Image (cartoon, rainbow, N blue to C red):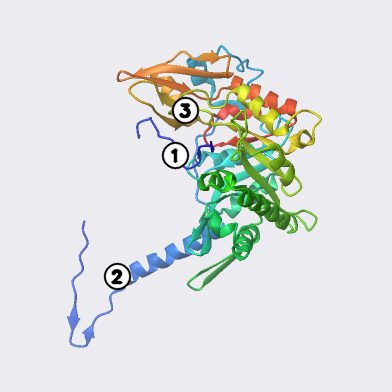
Amino acid sequence: MPPRRRDRRRPRDPSPETSRASTSAASSSSGSRFRPSLLAPLLLLLLLLILAALHFSGRLSLPRPQAPPQRTRLSVHERGLVRRDVSASEILAEHATVSENRSRRHFRNPVLAYVTPWNSKGYDMAKLYSTKFTHISPVWYDLKSDGNKLVLEGQHNFDAKWVSELQSNGSLVLPRVVLEAFPGVVLMKKKLRDKAIDLIVNECSYNCQFVIWLSVNRDKGYDGVVLESWSRWAVYGVLDDSELRNRALQFVKHLGKTLHLTSSNLSTHHHLKLIYVVPAPRMKELNNQEFRPEDLLQLADSVDGFSLMTYDFSGPQNPGPSAPLSWIQYSLKTLLAAKGSASHGHSHMIFLGINFYGNDFLLSKGDGGNAITGRDFIYLLDKYKPSLQWDEKSSEHFFVYSDKGLRHAVFYPTLMSLSLRLDEAQDWGTGLSIWEIGQGLDYFFDVL
């Protein structure tokens, strides 16, 4: 079964939301008089066009105000907060207090952090904790079909100042591109396949926008891209057809090789990188829609890493934990096969998926549920004062509450559940990929 599309859903927010002028025409014997008031709309339009151009080029960055977290000399480990028997009152009191040492890394392997425009807190967290992230992926682009043409949407999201600041702190910036284009267009027609690759590669290096008389030419200077296409191909049935499946893998290989031949903004000795998003195995007997060990081996020479989606295990139809630790272990064992095998040697290429979001499931009167962010989680803790329980089977915390006669179950990460998953990644020698840092609690970053 294909993985659920986690990124198109914006979580619900359960918290409450906080003289007519007239102008008369004047006339004279010499004709209509000049009226300065007519210039105001034109000047306003001109100003808006200039501001839009400056914002697009990154010369003007709009503020994203966020309440700064409180600082302490002690980490969450030193404060004794990483444990199973955690209470709602403790989380409410401690979640906004973080270690003042933001540069100390507890997890030494690569860390990929996703940032989404609809959770703008992530933009600030990426800058505050940039030393903890080796790779940062803003979720900005979609490659779509427009008749027989291809269109790359999302250029307006580019923020030059933000990208430059992250890179100056040592992080690689690789925006995510979702391949939404109809597979029959991209995979079967060489001309359009090459066009798709050109659109992606060229977006990493430059953009030219003409606004009336003002020309903006700005090097984007990305360090590569994160590509997501496997789940879309599964929906279209591409992976069930052996010829199309092979063409799909060849597309990824061709894109990777083209990026590797293109110099990055760092120097001519550094080349653009490709990280490929793949679903975590779910079935004991892998079907065609699963990403298999042989697929990993086929792509390993052409990509720089695999973002493994080890989250979204449960859903409204089957409420439960987001990422059971036993499933994570199964996924790694299946994808990397036995230790000593060819695929096991590529564990360093895996960015193990970690969720910073949770779910609020409805348990009575039909199925239902919503994804929740850290803000939602704190609101629910404060309102219902629930008792958190530790599920040994999944190694996750959860709680149950009732609202208007309906029972809910909430699964959301805690310091303990995150720490166990970081330990698992460390044991396997994998990196991390976090979906996504705008959804987490402030003190989550202390464990990284």
Decide which of tag 2 and tag 3 comes sooner along the chain: 2
Q: Is residue 71 visible?
A: no
Q: Is residue 209 left or right of residue 422?
A: left
Task: Identify the element where label 3 is drawn.
Answer: strand
Question: Callout 1: helix, strand or loop?
Answer: loop
Front residue of this view, candidates 384 and 357: 357
Separation (CA) of disc 2 from disc 3:
55 Å
Q: Nearer the viewer, residue 258 or 203?
A: 258
Q: Amino acid at mark 2?
A: Ser
Is residue 424 shown above or below 139? Answer: above
Point out residue 202 in the picture as x, y percentages from the top left corner.
64, 61
Q: How many marks?
A: 3
Circle on res. 359: 3
Would you call the spot at circle 1 few (<14 residues within 10 Å), some (14-19), or many (20 or more)? Answer: few
Task: Find disc 2 in the rendering and name its residue.
Answer: 37
Q: At label 1, which amino acid type do we have?
A: Arg
Give how far apart the Cα atoms at labels 3 and 1 are.
12 Å
Does the CB distance between marks 2 and 3 fall below 8 Å?
A: no
Picture coordinates of residue 191 (x, y %)?
62, 66
Furthest residue to the bottom?
Answer: 30
Q: How many neighbours does mark 2 have within 10 angstroms: few (below 14), some (14-19), or many (20 or more)?
A: few
Q: Is any part of residue 141 visible from this angle?
A: yes
Q: Which residue is mark 1?
A: 10
Tell me the distance, in whole angstroms, between the alpha carbons under discs 2 and 1: 43 Å
* Type of amino acid at the residue the image marks with label 3: Asn
Crowding near pointer 3: few (<14 within 10 Å), some, many (20+)?
many
The foreground one among 192 and 7 is 192
The secondary structure type at the circle numbered 2 is helix
Percent x, y of residue 325: 62, 22
Name the side, left or right, on which 345 lies relative to 168: right
Q: Earlier in the sequence, mark 3 or mark 1?
A: 1
Locate the C terminus and report the quarter of the image it occupies: top right
